[in-house]
Image (cartoon, helix red, strand yellow):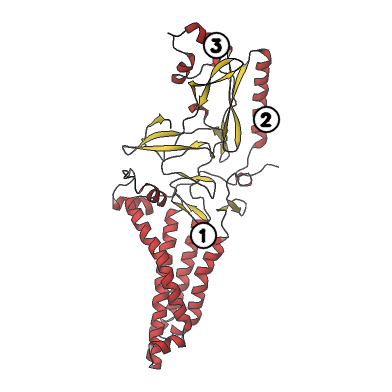
């Protein structure tokens, strides 16, 4: 029976409702977050808001105290759900390394059968231009792709996430391109909810003081729930309120938490900031990009295996017809040991001997130009399945991420 993408997903995510909802591996922390929000609000409605329902006599306005708290809580929980249960911007990983960036390096050669043969070298970085500023992107060995700018690999979820901000254990999900605005709205609404509960609890203490004509201590003894709520909200405000202020600064300067903590001492030019107002418009008024993953799509494993099997059979026939020796280069990237290329050595040795020391070597020529079919044995084509379609594996950065950007190669 054909499996779906979420059933063979290599990340550490947890899927619910047949792949319709995606959570992080620490999704159980959502129970704690829900309790920290719901329990104080229930206490507030029972011990504070219910007693204030007759305090505002005009049109029974006192019931609005409880209604506002309930509506605010529902709004906060919806934002929490939108933050933690959606794709944060995961970039689909390739099934094979990007073969088109492999280069033969004559300076690093291996000796097989008494012959020196150039080895394959893999550039680990690329330089790209973003708004006139050179930005270096790195190769991800786990996902087998070059990360777009502002993308990072989350070690907890084991995915590359576009515009990676951080992994939040309180929501059990990475915060990235597709859920950042919901995360900020969740944190800011939690801050407003804390302020509201704190203010109404303090007002109820004042009401008790007026009705009983006593001191603040006597009023606090009459309503210990109000005291507990005020203390809880005061402590929470230091967390969610400080987090809201910090992210307001990040949005205004168009930074991510990851960039702020990693590059704060490098004095780098921010290639992404377009001014405070434009940065806020980009964060809240742009369309949320669709997910690059269709987790419910059917994986066509049988078709791909048959194609790979037929290609391997063709390779074996060619080898049997031609008894010349070949070199097999293996590249161990992450957990996969993939066969990259097979090439024959006799033609290479003859060409090197024929040109001599004054001629240009074949290996050097292969660096500048594509390898001709006469010097390269058939290789397994790189394929990557995404959203039900089969496309060639590629490292290219998506044009929507790098508009009008040009790249140059560099090697560590």
The x, y position of residue 135, in whole percent, is 37, 38
- Marks 1/2: CA–CA distance: 41 Å
Tell me the tag on residue 276: none
Quadrant placement of the C terminus: top left
Q: Which residue, given by chain and number where applicable, does mark 2 sit on? A: 306
Label 2 sits on a secondary structure element that is helix
Residue displayed at 64% across by 28% down? 308
Element class at badge 1: helix
Q: How many marks?
A: 3
The answer to whether residue 56 is seen in the rendering is no
* Residue 181 visible, this orientation: yes
Within 10 Å of the Cα at label 3, are there few (<14), some (14-19), or many (20+) other Cα atoms? some
Q: Where is residue 230 in the image (x, y as percent from the top left)?
A: 43, 77
Q: Mark 3 highlights which residue?
A: 349
- Which part of the image, by quadrant, shows the N terminus? top right
Label 1 Cα crowd, 10 Å radius (few <14 / some 14-19 / many 20+): some
Q: Which mark sits nearer the N-terminus, 1 or 3? A: 1
**Image: 64 above or below 387:** below
Which residue of the protein is positioned furthest toward the bottom in this rendering?
Answer: 213
Q: Position of residue 147 (x, y in %)?
A: 46, 39
- Label located before the other in sequence (3 or 2): 2
Circle nearer the N terminus (1, 2): 1
Give the distance between the C-alpha atoms of the residues marked 3 and 2, in whole angstroms.
Answer: 35 Å
Give the foreground label among 1 and 3: 3
User: Compared to 345, does 250 lie above or below?
Assistant: below
Residue under numbered circle 1: 81
Residue 112 x %, y %? 60, 18
Residue 94: which quarter of the image? top right
Q: Nearer the viewer, mark 3 or mark 2?
A: 3
């Amino acid at each position: 029976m054909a499996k779906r993408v979420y059933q063979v997903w290599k990340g550490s995510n947890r899927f619910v409702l047949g792949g319709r909802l995606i959570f992080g591996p620490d999704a159980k922390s959502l129970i704690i977050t829900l309790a920290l929000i719901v329990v104080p609000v229930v206490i507030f409605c029972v011990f504070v808001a219910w007693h204030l329902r007759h305090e505002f006599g005009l049109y029974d306005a006192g019931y609005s105290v409880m209604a506002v708290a309930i509506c605010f809580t529902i709004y906060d929980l919806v934002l929490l759900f939108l933050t933690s249960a959606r794709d944060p911007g995961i970039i689909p990983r390739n099934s094979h390394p990007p073969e088109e960036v492999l280069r033969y390096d004559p300076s690093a050669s291996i000796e097989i059968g008494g012959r020196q043969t150039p080895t394959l070298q893999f550039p680990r970085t690329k330089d790209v231009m973003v708004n006139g500023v050179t930005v270096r992107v790195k190769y991800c060995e786990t996902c087998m792709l070059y990360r777009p700018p502002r993308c990072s690999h989350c070690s907890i979820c084991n995915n590359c996430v576009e515009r990676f901000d951080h992994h939040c254990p309180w929501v059990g999900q990475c915060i990235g391109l597709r859920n950042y605005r919901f995360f900020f709205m969740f944190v800011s609404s939690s801050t407003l909810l804390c302020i509201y509960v704190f203010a109404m609890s303090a007002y109820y203490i004042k009401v008790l003081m007026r009705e009983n004509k006593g001191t603040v201590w006597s009023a606090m003894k009459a309503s210990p729930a109000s005291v507990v709520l005020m203390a809880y909200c005061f402590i929470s405000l230091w967390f969610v309120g400080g987090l809201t202020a910090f992210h307001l600064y990040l949005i205004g300067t168009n930074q991510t938490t990851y960039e702020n903590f990693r590059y704060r001492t490098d004095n780098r030019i921010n290639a992404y900031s377009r001014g405070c107002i434009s940065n806020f418009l980009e964060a809240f008024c742009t369309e949320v990009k669709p997910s690059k993953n269709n987790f419910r799509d059917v994986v066509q494993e049988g078709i791909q295996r048959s194609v790979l099997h037929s290609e391997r059979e063709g390779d074996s026939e060619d080898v049997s017809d031609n008894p010349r020796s070949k070199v097999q280069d293996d590249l161990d990237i992450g957990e996969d040991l993939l066969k990259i290329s097979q090439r024959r050595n006799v033609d290479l040795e003859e060409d090197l001997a024929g040109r001599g020391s004054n001629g240009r070597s074949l290996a050097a020529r292969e660096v500048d130009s594509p390898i001709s079919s006469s010097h390269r044995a058939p290789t397994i084509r790189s394929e990557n399945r995404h959203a039900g379609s089969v496309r060639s594996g590629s490292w290219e950065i998506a044009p929507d991420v790098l508009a009008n950007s040009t790249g140059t190669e560099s090697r560590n």
